[in-house]
Image (cartoon, rainbow, N blue to C red):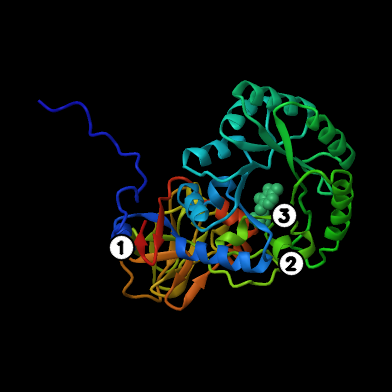
Amino acid sequence: MTDPTPPAATAEPANATAAGLRLEDVTRSLNAWVEVDLDALAGNVRALRETVGPGVELIAVVKANAYGAGVEGVAPALEAAGVERFAVVWAAEALNLRRLGITRPIIVLGHAFPTDAEAAVANGITLTVHSPKLAMAVSKAARKAGTRARVHIQVDSGLHRDGVTPDQAVALAHLISGLPGVELEGLSTHMANADEEDDSFADEQGRVFRAALEQLDWVPYRHAANSATAIRRGELRFGGVRIGLAMHGVLPPNTADPGLAPVLSVKARLARVVDVAPGEGVSYGLTWRAERPSRAGLVPIGYADGWSRHLSNRGEVLVGGRRCPMIGRVCMDQFLVDVTELPGAAEGDEAVLLGAQGSERITADDVAARSGTISWDVLASLQARLPRIFHRGGIVQ
Ligand SMILES: *Cc1c(COP(=O)(O)O)cnc(C)c1O
């Protein structure tokens, strides 16, 4: 008789039991993975702190799974590196940070519902309050829990995405000051074109924000800057800067490098290498055809992993230290790469989609340019199936 119960599938991430092992040993049998260099991350925190100077807090923006890098490894490493606060967009993301053991203040930048108030207050999470209804829900939750809750108000200074008008902010602030259990700790705003060559609209937004601050000078904490603003505009740093992209060593356009190092790599192993005769095609639609006797390597990662289908016949991958063109369409789980110039290419060879191999490097900006998007999108699109391997100096953490 055979046991009808199959062995339990393990839901553990690939690196859950791999701490202390070498990167190459842990990744030897992986199809594809994301490597996160925690030394580079800590170095970026130091460089950014140097740039913004004393008296300005670093607020690490770790929304969207820490920009695809894996919040479970990135957030604790940032806390250890000394960032003063965290920010996310969803209330659920903030609760997840507490589950991960983050103890520093966490700001929810995005829309919260009154139904989010109780869990947020119980977990010491700072909501951005946008309505009297939400403010009252926070007050009620704070009284129920016998605690004081801190909240922030975001002033819409011209982005017209979220936040409230300056007048509404003043009215809401006065309402909050009369509510028991709630303390209005912070005022924020968000910039519309901080990374454009002409970022002069930030001057206008700064004026609008400052006018609101003058009316609410009793509110102690102010924050307005994303990565580009924090690096480019000293006068808009206020009490803290909200840094997302730059933590990962990727710079917004038109932004000088304060000495950052890339944190994240995307790698895969060739699943096989096949011959393609002249005239034959590869992948769905046969959109690429060999013009010479060719060899195609199968890369086991696809658009389901966040490797954009827009990279079909446009992207490049490093194999054997060379840039090799992606050929044919990107499928859900795999795509092909032309390795004709690498006669030794074989199953198991490392393919670098993002990051360095030998003296070559593919940056998030390279990938973004080839897929018609921005570096933020390239990182944040990386999906859960890819194991995140956090390491320091090549040793898995
Ligand atoms: C995402 C986000 C940031 C971080 O932006 P980066 O350009 O990645 O540094 C800052 N503030 C708000 C409100 C955001 O939504």
The residue carrying mark 2 is 232
Q: Eyeballing the image, is 32 above or below 321?
A: above
Q: What residue type is labelled 1?
A: Arg
- Location of mark 3 (residue): 239
- Name the disc covering residue 22, or none: 1
Which of disc 3 and disc 2 is earlier in sequence?
2
SS type, badge 1: loop
Residue 340 locus on image (x, y percent): 40, 73
In this rendering, the label closer to the viewer, 1 or 2: 2
Q: State left or right for residue 216 relative to residue 148.
A: right
SS of the residue at dot 3?
loop
Q: Nearer the viewer, residue 166 or 368?
A: 166
Return the disc, 1 or 2, that comes first in the chain's sequence.
1
CA separation in Å, label 2 and label 3: 16 Å
Residue type pointed to by label 3: Gly
- The answer to whether residue 185 is above or below residue 357 is above
Along the line of sight, the residue nearer the viewer: 281 or 89:
89
Quarter of the view holding residue 91: top right
Q: Are marks 1 and 2 in contact (CB under 8 Å)?
A: no
Q: How crowded is mark 3: few (under 14 residues within 10 Å), some or many (20 or more)?
A: some
Q: Which of 299 and 210 is in front in this view?
A: 210
- At label 2, counting other C-alpha atoms closer than 10 Å, the crowd grade (few under 14, some 14-19, many 20 or more) is some
**Mark 1 and mark 3: Cα distance apart in space:** 40 Å
